[in-house]
Amino acid sequence: CRPGFFKASPHSQSCSKCPPHSYTNEEASTSCVCEKDYFRRESDPPTMACTRPPSAPRNAISNVNETSVFLEWIPPADTGGRKDVSYYIACKKCISHAGVCEECGGQVRYLPRQIGLKNTSVMMVDLLAHTNYTFEIEAVNGVSSLSPGIRQYVSVNVTTNQAAPSPVTIVKKGKIAKNSISLSWQEPDRPNGIILEYEIKYFEKDQETSYTIIKSKETTITAEGLKPASVYVFQIRARTAAGYGVFSRRFEFETTPVFAASSDESQIPIIAVSVTVGVILLAVVIGFLLSGSCCECGCGRASSLCAVAHPSLIWRCGYSKAKQDPEEEKMHFHNGHIKLPGVRTYIDPHTYEDPNQAVHEFAKEIEASCITIERVIGAGEFGEVCSGRLKLPGKRELPVAIKTLKVGYTEKQRRDFLGEASIMGQFDHPNIIHLEGVVTKSKPVMIVTEYMENGSLDTFLKKNDGQFTVIQLVGMLRGIAAGMKYLSDMGYVHRDLAARNILINSNLVCKVSDFGLSRVLEDDPEAAYTTRGGKIPIRWTAPEAIAFRKFTSASDVWSYGIVMWEVVSYGERPYWEMTNQDVIKAVEEGYRLPSPMDCPAALYQLMLDCWQKDRNSRPKFEEIVNMLDKLIRNPSSLKTLVNASSRVSNLLSDHGPLGSGAYRSVGEWLEAIKMGRYTELFMENGYSSMDAVAQVTLEDLRRLGVTLVGHQKKIMNSLQEMKVQLINGMVPL
Ligand code: ACK
C-alpha cells in the first residue's frame, strides 16, 4: 500500500484509506497512526477513526433538598467521535471561610452511581447539612485514559440545607428495678442544629403494637409501670427545627424479678448527691425564668448571658408556652392510632386579652442597635420592607429582612402588624419563613425575619421564564407542600396561599410567608370583597371558602393547586384576565384551569386532584409531599407531558371554534401580541382565519418553525386566553 493507505491483513484484497484522524507516511503499512491528540483503543479495529476524549458536559444545574443534591447536565458538544461517553462525579467538601476543600470520602451515596454514569443526572444523598460542596461532572469516553490532557469537567457549587439529626447511637442503662428502667444516651453525632427534645419509644418485647412514647428534653429518662422480669425494647430519636431524625437501633433491657434487689442499690449515695445538684440547678433555672431576662434575648448583657449559659432555654423563651409544658410528656399508643402528644398546635393570638403579651410569648425582643438597615426592597401594607444585617451577641451576623411599621400608626395597626410576628414566631420549619425577632421597645417598630435572596416566588419565576428544569420546579413545589403540611399539622389555615406569598432563597428553597388573620386578606391587592362582605383572593380560593367562608386545610390544598399551576407556568396569572365573577362562575360550573405548557402529566393530575369540588376528596398535604418526593426520586416519571394538542382541544371540545370577535384578522391578532413577524408564516401555511388559528397546537407551531420557547408560549397563551373568554370557562372536569 502506498502512504495514506493500509492493509490490516495480507489476506485482504485491497489497500484501505487511513480512517479519519489517522495517517501513515510509509509504504506497506498494516495500520495507520493516530494524529496528535487522537487515540485508538486496543479493542478499536484499525478501520475505525481515531478518536479523542469528549469536551466537558454543559449547562449543569443543581437542586438542593436538605442534604441531598440532584445534578443534571447536557452532554458535551464534542463526544470525541465515540459513542461510549459516560460521566464521573468528583465531590469536594469545602470550608467556605478557609477556602480549603477536601475529597468527600465514602459517606456520600451516589444514585445510581458515581462512575460510569450513562444518564445525564445523578443524585447525591447523605451529605452533611449546612456545608459547601463542589461537584465536578467529568465526561469520559473509551480513550480518556489514553490522553494525558486536562480533565474535561463542569463544576457546580452548592450549599446543603438543614437536615434532621442523625440517629442516637449510644444508649446506656441506669437503674433497673422490677417496675422501672432508667436510661441515658449521648447526643447524636450529627445533631444538625439545636436538639429541642428526644422521643423515646418503648414496648414489651414481641408486643410492638402496644407501645409508649416519652418525650424528654434531657438525655435521661425512667420508664415506669413496667412488668417485673420482662424484656423491654427501647428506641430513641432526636428532634431539631428540621424535624425528627430516624429512630436509633433497638436496645433491649430486662426488669428485675419481683423479689430481686434493684440493680443499683449500691449507687444510692451517688443518686442522693445528683438529686441535690439537680435541685440546685432547677432553682437556678427557675430563677432565670422568673427574672424574665431570658425572654429578652436582645443585645443586653443579661440576654447574651441567657443565650450562652442556657442555650436550651432560648427555645423556651422564643416559641413555647414553656410554663405549661411539662418537661416530660407521656402518652400510650395502641396500634399507633393516637395522635402524638408532642405535636404543637397553633395558638390564635386573638385569644390573648393583651396582644402585646402574645408577641412577647412567641417572638424575641431585639434591641434596635443590633440591626443595620441597608436598603429598601419593597413596600408592605404597614410600611417599608428593608434588607439589612442582624448581629446578636455571641452569634454570627445574619442577613435579614426588616418589615417596619410606618410612623403615625394607630393602635389597631400596631396590633395587626405585630400579629404576624405572633403567628410566625410559633413556627419552626425549614419551609416556613423564620422570625428572628421583633423591635417593639423603640421606634420604628420592626419585624425581623431571615433574608430570602430571590424575593417573592411569582416575581422570581416571571423574571426567569423557562430557566429551570422540571426537577427544580418540583423541588420548589415540594418545599411549599412541606411547609404547608407543617402548618396544617399545627392547625393553622393560611387562607392566602399564592406564589406572591412564597419567598425563595439563593438555593431555590421556597418558604411560606405572609401570616395573619383577617389582616392577610386586607393587605393583599388580589383580595376582593365578596357579596357577603369578606375580602378574598378569588382566583386562589376554594369554592366553599368563597361561598360560605369554609376555610380549612383542604381549602389551602385548593390554593396549593393554583400555586402549582403558577409555578409550572412561570408566574402566569391564573385565569388570565377573566373577571373574578367569571372565575367564580366557571369554577362553580366545573371548569378548571388547563394544563400549563410542557407540564408533566403527573403534576397536572395532582393540580386537578387539589381542585376537587368535594373538599374531602382533595389530597392532604402529607400525601402531596409524598407524591412529589416519589416524582423527584424517579425523574423519568416526569417525562410524560400533558399532550400538547389535548391541552388545547380540551378547551375547545363541545364549545365550538374560536370566534372572530376579539380580532378581525390573524395579522391583527399577531400584531396585538407583538408576534407580527409570524403573520406571513401563518398565512402561507393555511392559518389565514381566526377559526383556522383556533386549531393550532404547540406541535404545529414547532413544525412551522416557531422555535423560540418564549414566542411559542406567547402565542399559545394568547390562544388559550381568547378561548377561555369565548367559552367563559375552562377545562370541564
Ligand atoms: O418580590 P420581592 O423582592 O420580595 O418584593 C417583596 C417586598 O419585600 C415586599 O414584600 C420582599 N420581601 C419580603 N420579605 C422578604 C424576605 N424575608 N427576604 C427577602 N425579601 C423579602 C418581597
Image (cartoon, helix red, strand yellow):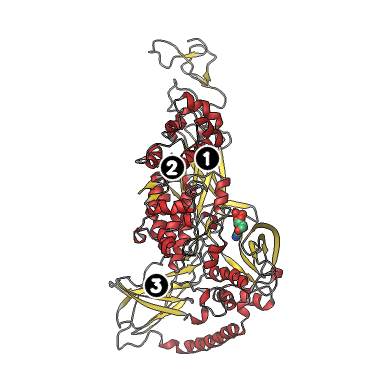
Q: Position of residue 680 (x, y in %)?
A: 52, 25
**Which residue is identified by label 1?**
138
- Whichever of labels 1 and 2 marks the residue nearer the N terminus, that label is 1
Q: Amino acid at mark 2?
A: Leu
Ligand 1 positioned in quadrant: bottom right
How far separated are the C-alphas under marks 1 and 2?
53 Å
Asked if one can make out residue 400 in the rendered structure from this viewpoint, the answer is: yes
Q: Residue at x 70, y 73 (%)?
A: 442
How far separated are the C-alphas under marks 2 and 3?
52 Å
Q: Residues within 10 Å of mark 2 (few under 14, many from 20)?
A: some
Which structural element holds mark 1? strand
Q: Quadrant of residue 650?
A: top left
Q: Position of residue 87 (x, y in %)?
A: 48, 40
Q: Amino acid at mark 3?
A: Leu
Are the residues tagged 1 and 3 within 8 Å (C-beta)?
no
Q: Amino acid at mark 1?
A: Glu
**Which residue is identified by label 3?**
340
**Which residue is identified by label 2?**
726
Q: Residues within 10 Å of mark 3 (few under 14, many from 20)?
A: few
| Residue sitting nearer the eye, 708 or 509 | 708
